[in-house]
Amino acid sequence: MENERFFKALSRQRNPTHELKTQFNRMVKREVYRSHAMLMDEEAVCNKMWFIVKGSAMAYVVNNGKKVPYWFWNEGEIMVPIHSFFKQVPLGGYIQVMERCTMLSITYQAVRTLIEKFPDFNFLLMDLMEDSHHSAEQRICSLTAHEPCERYELLLKESTFIARKAPVEAIAFYIGVSRKTLNRIRMKR
């Protein structure tokens, strides 16, 4: 059942073959991580693509000793640092779960095998990369085109799990404001 959710999140409206789905399911592994477990550090090369069954995670860099998040993932989402995974280069940041997480994973080598055996699998990966790119563009637009209070309102509207699960300081960095400014914005609501 969990594998089905992972494959469905990856394939969306496309209708891949039964053989591809069967092979994919054989390659998926279940993993459980304790709260605040570190999945990757800045020098690690991403060797897995995950599907978050339960829980949430964030990617961040460290600037002046503080965690500055740049991406969040919630349950029901595919978690993959695109550049590190597909180019097999160091992440340059960190990935940490924010709470106890149950995830499904597939390795880079398994993905390469699926690409070789099932060329249509490339379309699923292309959709995933396009969605990731679109999300990044939306985030840049939000940071450059909206006032801080609007960025916070967008966060509440589009990514409520971040407001519920992430530390206040992480939320402030994520929307590009100081913690004091975020507190003022929250008090005005």
Image (cartoon, rainbow, N blue to C red):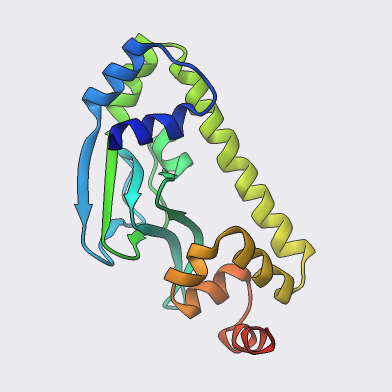
Q: Quadrant of residue 45?
A: top left
Q: Where's residue 121, x and y in %?
A: 44, 18
Percent across and percent down for residue 15 are 48, 16
At 31% from the left edge and 39% from the top edge, which residue is drawn? 48
Instruction: Return the residue nearer the eye: 22 or 138.
Output: 22
Residue 158 shows in the view: yes
| Residue 60, percent from left and from top | 45, 62
Q: Quick check: 26 left or right of 160?
A: left
Say which of 82 and 121 sits in front: 121
The x, y position of residue 124, in whole percent, is 49, 24
- Image position of 179 with respect to 111: above or below: below
Residue at 56% over, 76% down: 172
Which residue lies at the image location 21% right of the left edge and 41% below the top edge? 30
Q: Quadrant of the N terminus?
A: top left
Which quadrant of the rendered structure holds the C terminus? bottom right
For residue 146, above or below residue 52: below
Camera-nearest residue between 104 and 54: 54
Q: Residue at x 38, y 46 (%)?
A: 90
Q: How many marks?
A: 0
